[in-house]
Amino acid sequence: MLDYFLLGLLQGILEWIPVSSEGFISIILQSLETEANPVSLAIYFHLGTAFSVLVYLREEVKEIVSNIFSKDFSGLTGFILISTICSIIVGFPLYFFAKSFSGLGLLLLFGVGLMVTGIMLKGRKGFKQKEEMDYKDAVYAGALQGLAVVPGLSRSGVTLFALFSSGYAPDTALKTSFLMSVPVVLGAAVFMHLDSFVFKPVYLLSLVAAFSTGIIAMHFLLSLSSRLDFSKVCWFFGAIAILAALGGFYV
């Protein structure tokens, strides 16, 4: 039980940092030899951080829901809807691809994905900032978010890359990235239950821990939004994962 609680704490911290919480959690779950598919369970743990977004950014969430009911799809509301559709189109088939990886193959995939994320984030500075949200940016960011179902390719990392490179200010990019995670995570959880995912009460510990630490981590990141650069962190962990996987292949 303690293992799942600690995994939830880790999810709450890593979800917002561009180092692929899904990849980290999948690798750890694999070592614990759980009955559930490690990639599926890692994605399921995202429910905890999704609920933390609903609470922490509740005013933005209320506005989006209100706009949907009033059929006003401008601004942030339209951006979230379009990006969600694009994420589903790209991410749905990739989910089955990611599930097929295990053992050293999963570790190698994780390492390569992190290296790619680091390269993308390295070029985030120097872009002109735009005032209004663009639907073309929503397609771009949503498609990249769909790719992040592959372990190691960080969801927050690729969405921040898309938003930064499209000209959004750091605080706007972070909040938008947080909000983009909610509908795809909720949809993924529903799909996994329909796809014979078996829920166990112990998973609640992970969800509660992820929810609590997720709120704290979001607040911390937003307060430091203009000074963050995680590209080197991605490269470091990515290199370790690749070397460990390659070393394992040759043993």
Image (tube, grey):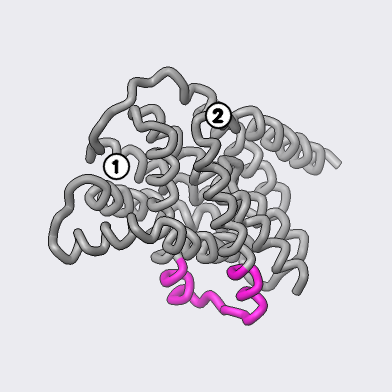
Q: Secondary structure at mark 1?
A: helix
State left or right for residue 106 relative to residue 138: right
Residue at mark 2 to residue at mark 1: CA–CA distance: 24 Å
Q: Look at 61% across and 58% down and name the residue there.
A: 213
Q: Secondary structure at mark 2?
A: helix
Give above or below for 24 relative to 227: below
Number of the front mark, 2 or 1: 2
Q: Look at 80% across and 43% down and name the residue there.
A: 248
| Magenta region includes residue 130 | no
Type of the residue with mark 2: Arg
Dot 1 surroundings within 10 Å: few (below 14), some, or many (20 or more)? many
Q: Look at 31% across and 48% down and name the residue there.
A: 83
Q: Which residue is mark 2?
A: 227
Q: Look at 43% across and 54% down and name the residue there.
A: 181
Q: Which numbered circle lies on residue 138?
A: 1
Magenta stretch bounds? 189-208
Task: Say whether residue 38 is visible.
Answer: yes
State left or right for residue 8 relative to residue 215: right
